[in-house]
Amino acid sequence: VAAMADLLADHEHGGRRLVDDLPRPDSADPRAIRSVGVIGGGTAGYLTALALRAKRPWLDVTLVESPSMPIIGVGEATTPSMVPFLHHYLGVDPAELYERVRPTWKMGIRFDWGANPDGFMAPFDWNANSVGILGSLREQGDINAFTLQSLYMRADRVPVFRLGDRYATLLDRLPYAYHLDNERFVRYLTELAERRGVRHVQARLADVVKSADDWIDHVRTTDGETLEFDFWVDCTGFRSMLLGKALGTPFTSYADSLFCDSAVTGNVDHGGVLKPYTTATTMNAGWRWTIPTPESDHLGYVFASGALSDEEAAAELARSAPGVTEPRFVRFRVGRHHEAWRGNVMGVGNSYAFVEPLESSGLMMITLEILALVSSLPASWSEPCARDVVNQALAQKWDAMRWFLTLHYRFNDRLDTPFWRDARERSDVSGLRPLLDAFATGAPLRFRDAVTRGFLESAAPTFYGLEGVDCLLLGQKVPTRLLPATEPHEAWRRRKAGADALVRQGVGQREALDAFAADPALHAAILDDPGSWVSASGTDRLVRN
Ligand code: FAD
């Protein structure tokens, strides 16, 4: 049997090929790609430049940004893939990141949303169903006790435990993400890029000169300088100077599904309490995020300018959070360009695509785009290039995210304002229609038989799998026929009691962060332990969100 098993194993598959075997340019090749110009100095620009230097250190990477054109300056909640991306892919030292950027932990999103007065939890361990979604619905009428992490979120605690004068953590078993203060994060990335050999040019692009329809030859800056690179990464944000303006890549809007196009932001005192999650609260013409930073809660009311003026939005934000600082307004557009990569230009970040931040997808999608670029860039223009794979894969990911977000709008019956009535009636969910029909006939979808699940997965793009759809639809109490339990009720209650006992042992986030600052070995327990969710699946975790 052992010999047979050995015969059937895949001996050639190294498992690490995603980043290990990147092609180097030949020194004699006149068409080799040796220089890359990253245009734009927001999170997209800096993360791209750092990734290129980390994985293709032979490239000469220049980042160009205009001091007179500010970065978008928001984008603080992330998803778990950011943790391995920063620490394993880019090699960012955790102790340094914690000291300089002062992130807080995010266990998931708490939605003040839907019919349930308590809303629902979308914890990052939603795949695990560790306590049980059917038992939670049966015993307490909502999904809020379906995983261990949702119980931590409800208790405002984190899985870090005091053991005498030491601390231990379960964060290596429960996926978490960072809340990153945008200003501190970009400042830190700027310094890191300098340390890692990224050339920095402060200049504003005035003219883009093409040598063919999809090929940029050089650019001229407003100071009269000419810049030339073998490859260009457009990180100019919504201006999309290269991919959109210069190459004229068509744009597909998602505005039929997602009506919001503006945000008003501010900060409010949190009285020292650091909630270990992002909160999304339903508002009259959209929703409001609450993101904890060590000093204060960062708030943002995402709204539809067609339904509310800036002044009305600022006033509603102030009413919902007395004491909030002066409002700051941000405009955005939702949708994607037909292609991320055309000719010798790839768009990364808002220059290529954007959806509003309801699932904190901005930085996650940027990291996916970067992975695609770093692993697919050829060593030379004389070699074949997998542009189409990158374009199709990224387009599918973005479209799947659009449909997933739309589920939040179509079914949220928390408020009966004109905006929400309109959203419930008109937001286009056609991309997920087959899945919604199947949901009505029996849920959770994750417990449907294997054949049905297989068909569902190929019939509709779900982004976070059937489990993500279950969480969202059952959390909002969308009507369905619940599948019967397969265990005695007592079994669920025992599991829940065990989970509650573990949650009671957890400390508050502030105490836990102080413990990590005092003992950096705690980081290693999470990041380097082979059994940890961060390292176990290696690069695989990066592409699975
Ligand atoms: P920008 O930050 O806009 O940077 C553009 C850069 O291009 C600037 O440096 C500018 O100087 C430069 N530039 C532009 N034109 C020129 C020119 N002609 N010459 C030279 N330089 C030029 N993401 C999350 O992950 N989580 C969140 O919680 C989240 N919340 C968000 C909330 C809102 C309201 C919005 C709008 C976005 C949010 N995002 C979030 C998304 C996130 O902010 C962005 O995706 C991310 O910051 C990337 O921005 P960027 O680097 O593409 O563009």
Image (cartoon, helix red, strand yellow):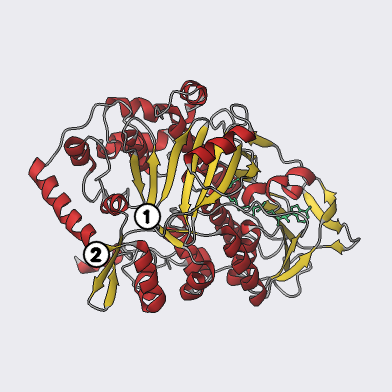
Vertical arrangement, residue 99 with respect to residue 403, above or below = below
> Which of the pair 210/300 is nearer the observer?
300
Q: Position of residue 14 (x, y in %)?
A: 43, 68
Q: Residues within 10 Å of mark 1 (few under 14, many from 20)?
A: many
> Which of the pair 387/99 is nearer the observer?
99
Residue sitting at x 34%, y 73%: 525
> Which of the pair 183/174 is nearer the observer?
183
Total marks shown come to 2
Q: Which image quarter is the N terminus in?
A: bottom left
Q: Position of residue 233 (x, y in %)?
A: 69, 57
Q: Return the mark for residue 459.
A: none
| Left or right position of 483 against 302 | left
Q: Position of residue 68 (x, y in %)?
A: 78, 56
Does residue 225 appear anywhere in the picture? Answer: yes
Does residue 528 appear anywhere in the picture? Answer: no
The residue wearing badge 1 is 107
Label 1: state its secondary structure: loop
Vertical arrangement, residue 438 with respect to residue 145, above or below = above
The residue wearing badge 2 is 4
